Amino acid sequence: MPALLLGVGSTPATASPTTITVRIPADLRSIVPGVNRDNNTDGIMAQIVEGLVAYGEDGQPKPMLADKIDVSPDGRTYTFTLREGVKFHDGKSLTADDVIASWNYYVDPKHEWRCLPEMGAGGTMKVIGVEASGPSTVIFKLDQPNALFLSTMARTDCGMTGILQKDSFGASGTIERPIGTGPFKFAEWKRKEFVRLEKFSDYAVSNAPTDGLAGAKRPLVDEVKFVVVPDDATAKAALLSGDLDIIPEIANSDYNELKNDKRVSVSIAPTMGPVGLIIQTRDPLLRKVEMRQAIAAALDIPALVEAVTSGTAKPNNSIVPITSPYYGQVEQHGFVHDLDKVKSLLEKAGYNGEPVVIETNKNYQYAFDTAVIAQQMLQSAGINATIEVIEWATQFEHYSTGKYQVQVFAYSGRMDPSLSYDVMSGPKDKQPRKLWDDADVQALLAKSIAASEKSERQTIFDELHEKFIEDVPMIPLYNFTVVAASGARIEGYKASTIQLPLLWNVSIKN
């Protein structure tokens, strides 16, 4: 058994036939849904909490804690009827009051909920009122119609707008322990080592078919233990030896090796999340558009993507994912590798060999590999690119505060192009994590949200794509492909387009 697993007090997977161990490359950031989060944290919270709606595998929001959703003719009022028989982990029944208490927590600015900028005061889909109409009915009122309301409620980076039992909140109003309705309940967190969840025996299974984060979820093991294993090689060795049961995302470089290994089962799922190089447009050097364009032109993107993903992903320079119905002919045209153009652009930018620092981490192998290959390509084109390898937590903090030049970064998948553009565009003064601060872009984005006809929205997304390629606030490389691996004793686990580990309906053979 790897010493790292012994060091965290982990027991061999065979010690408990009803415990499955899952690798996480970095520690849980917090126990609050949609606050101080990353994709790693979202994956754990998805087992614990549920929202009124949840994403299906097709990227559309489906009822989850809601049994029925009625929308008023003017599109401004959403009435949610709660499912009967749903209980929290403490045994108390789900009520409309719990929905309202959770919502009030999220929209309190001091808690810094991830989706507050979109749904709070001044947001693109401002909720102006939430009220109960009986113990099982909740009414949300918007200031104006918005076709993305349910999709935003379901967003995993927003914690699925997860509903928590009122006793989750301490005297100060902060969440002391997440008491959710999910198939597993929070049990223990030993920082930097593991997070342990227990089966929720009274979980109310939906009558709807299993569909991504929605539908029927059955907890089939007594315990799920997320073990922090930062190193990919160590994690792979633990999987092959049986000390780990599931690696939700294996390194692309390991795919060809493991796909034929009878000790494991490998599955692949395309996602809507873009991976690429994000660029700080307020940096003294990179604020020059010619400099950003030169970096893009210096990259042989098809070769880079082939090398990093072992051929499991296709290049895509658009924020609109390849699997989206809005990925059209315009979106297929992106950056062109042209070293002569690089030279001309560098001259226009007045470039004198200043360093361009690419931040990355080794918690995610694809991030490190991307940085190394990009550095080589940039240096070959005359750009003094250097790499700074830091812990993922530090890199995420730099992203959140805008304190970087270039980062290798991956976004969680957004199921609508408006949401994809929205996550990276906006005023940097108010939201430093935003990449693209352009008033015209914000106006186009608002139009895309208000538009109802697909043809009209397609025209808007085409225009946004062309502006994006010209401005280069980011160099999207490809849409993330999840390659998952599970041990021989695990049954029912597969990679998901949701880009999170779905641990319900997963069991141990025999």
Image: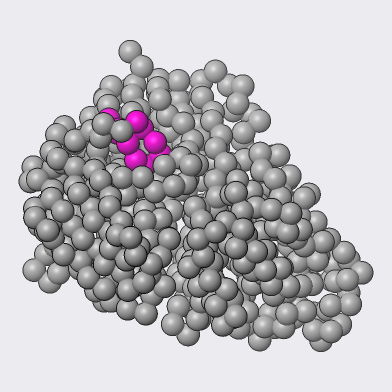
At horizontal 63% and vertical 82% (from top left) the residue drawn is 283
The quarter in which the N terminus is drawn is: top left
Residue extending farthest to the top is 510
Residue 189 drawn in magenta: no
Camera-side residue: 343 or 56?
56
Q: Main secondary structure of the magenta part?
A: loop
Q: Is residue 69 above or below residue 263?
A: below
Residue 215 drawn in magenta: yes
Give the residues drawn in magenta, as a range.
Answer: 209-218
Residue 73 location, x and y as percent?
33, 60
Residue 20 location, x and y as percent?
33, 30
At horizontal 67% and vertical 83% (from top left) the residue drawn is 287
Residue 353 location, x and y as percent?
79, 79
In screen coordinates, is 289 left or right of 260? Answer: right
Image quadrant of residue 132? bottom left
Residue 166 visible here: no
Camera-side residue: 372 or 471?
471
Residue 249 visible here: yes
Q: Is residue 126 above or below residue 100?
A: below
At horizontal 33% and vertical 13% (from top left) the residue drawn is 510
In screen coordinates, is 353 left or right of 38? Answer: right
Camera-side residue: 290 or 489?
290
Image quadrant of residue 176? bottom left
Image quadrant of residue 381? bottom right
Residue 374 location, x and y as percent?
73, 59
Q: Is residue 238 above or below residue 15?
A: below
At horizontal 36% and vertical 17% (from top left) the residue drawn is 509
